[in-house]
Amino acid sequence: MADIARRAGCHKSTVSLALKKHPALSQATGDRIRALAKEMGYIPDASLSLIASHRWNTSAPRGHTGVVIGLLVNRGRPSANLDRIYPAAAAAAASHGFMTERIHLDDYRNAKAATRVLYNRGIRGLLLPPFWPEEDMAALDWSVFTPVCCGFGWRSLPAHTVTFDWFRATQLAWRKVAERGYRRIGAAVFCHRPPAEDDFFRIGASQAEQALLLPPSSHVPVLTCEHYDKAAFLKWLDQHRPDAVIGFSDGPYYWARDAGHRIPEQLGYASLNVTSPLLTGMPHPLEDVGAAAAEYLITLLHGNELGLPAHPRTLLVEPTWNVGPSLPDRR
């Protein structure tokens, strides 16, 4: 920090304020110092910043102060999403001087043993996957950790959460498809078993947008069968004959095409989780979710906020709309 102050021609305290984005410093001065720090390869020391937080917060709990954030992987439910969320979280944490480590609950006899080991290793911050077995939630002693969930899942843990805004994404998809001239739109948003919190957002947004955008004679029942039920999707498609489908993912596009439906000549398609440049829709910004979750967790650690909050907060990552050849303009 002293080197940055010398280069910037200011006192170390000014550099400190700039790096914390303190409102007492002008935007221009702060931006200049932060740009200089980045150019010089500055990385904050997480342990020192946490110690400082404890020093000035007299109500902070005492004990170990960790600089490792645990990335929890729950039992028996590996998720490809975590392979996108956690590397982004690790990169964001590293930019603030924190290390990360994947914690597999399968490596421990039970959740109580995991609590003891993680606590004794000085790990306080935990990022959690969206789907959690109830028995693990009940057994972990959350009072000694700062947890942040990466997605809603079954939402049985009342923790702060960072997630994709599925309601807004579904709402945006309906409006974009309708704007392109489609008048018999079907939503194949599917549903987890048991239903996850975000299932209700996709289903609710679809029902609301259909009621507001289209006359009752054009309504198509929202498909809410279990994910990856190809037979149910194709039966629904043949029975209701929509002119466009809003799908939960890219999968139904290929199911319909392989079953002989001509896309995009006769059937338009938009995906709520685009992975192919052939499709119109929006990508699932899992990397943004991971980075935002890590940064939010670090903010909570600096504020010494341990345990489950009385009033959990949710940070939503907004969708972006990508145009591909699967949804031509029908106007």
Image (spheres, helix red, strand yellow):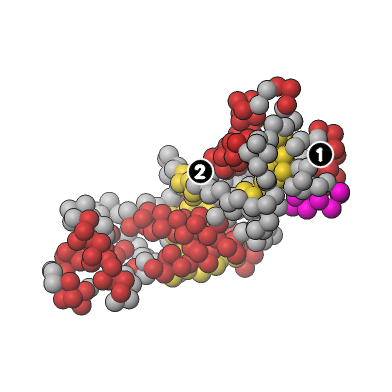
Quadrant placement of the C terminus: top right
Q: Please, what is the three-letter code of the amino acid marked with disc 2?
A: Pro
The kind of secondary structure element at disc 1 is: helix
Residue 158: give its label: 2
Q: Position of residue 189 (x, y in %)?
A: 69, 41
Q: Which residues are magenta?
A: 251-260
The kind of secondary structure element at disc 2 is: loop
In the image, residue 77 sits, relative to residue 201, either above or below, namely below
- At 61% across and 30% down in the image, what residue appears? 209
Please report contact status of discs 2 and 1: CB closer than 8 Å, yes or no. no
Q: Please, what is the three-letter code of the amino acid marked with disc 1?
A: Leu
Residue 193 in view here: no
Confirm whether the magenta stretch covers residue 308: no
- At 41% across and 58% down in the image, what residue appears? 295
Q: Position of residue 29 (x, y in %)?
A: 19, 61
Q: Position of residue 101 (x, y in %)?
A: 51, 69
Residue 13 in view here: yes
How crowded pointer 2 is (Cα within 10 Å; few <14, some 14-19, many 20+) is rated as some
Q: Position of residue 139 (x, y in %)?
A: 57, 52
Among the 4 quarters of the image, the one containing residue 128: bottom right
User: Foreground residue, 240 or 182?
Assistant: 182
Residue to which mark 1 is pinned: 237
- At 69% across and 59% down in the image, what residue appears? 76
How crowded pointer 1 is (Cα within 10 Å; few <14, some 14-19, many 20+) is rated as some
Q: Residue furthest front?
A: 331
